[in-house]
Image (tube, grey):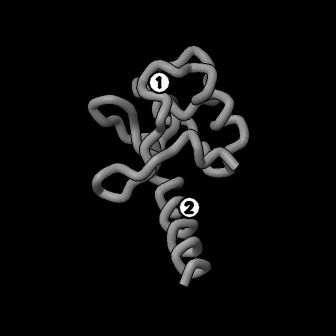
Amino acid sequence: MDMDFWSKNERGQAQFNGGRHDWLLAAGIAGNCPHFLLDDEDELVAEEERSCYNCRFRRWTDRSFICMKRQTVVNVQSDESSTLTK
C-alpha cells in the first residue's frame, strides 16, 4: 500500500509527503486511485492529466496538499491499528 506517501497533518488529514513538485509520484498514485476525479480545467496544474495535483479532491496546503478521499482511509487504518494493539 502507498501509505508511505501520506502522513497525517495536525488536523488528522492525509497530507501528501511528496510536496508540491513530485510530479511522477503524484501521477503514479492517481493512476491507481479509485477516487480520482479530474478537477475543473482552470484548476489543472500538472501536464499529466491523471495526477493527484489535478484531482478534484485535492486541497492545497503551504507545502503540499491533502486528499479529501484518502483522509477516510488513513483514519480507518489508524483506528484498526489501535484496535489490533489493544
N-terminal of the pair, mark 2 or mark 1, is 1
Task: Write the residue at 65% across / 36% down.
Answer: 29
Q: Position of residue 11 (x, y in %)?
A: 29, 57
Which mark, residue 44?
1
Amino acid under disc 1: Leu
Task: Write the residue at 58% across / 74% down.
Answer: 80
Task: Write the residue at 48% across / 65% down.
Answer: 75
Q: Quadrant of the C terminus?
A: bottom right
Q: Quadrant of residue 15?
A: top left
Up-down: is 69 above or below 57?
below
The residue carrying mark 2 is: 73
Camera-nearest residue between 39 and 79 = 79
Q: Is 11 displayed left or right of 24 in the figure?
A: left
Q: Position of residue 31 (x, y in %)?
A: 70, 35
Q: Position of residue 40 (x, y in %)?
A: 46, 33
Q: Most extreme residue toward the front, as rendered? A: 85
Q: Residues within 10 Å of mark 1 (few under 14, many from 20)?
A: some
Camera-nearest residue between 15 and 39 = 15
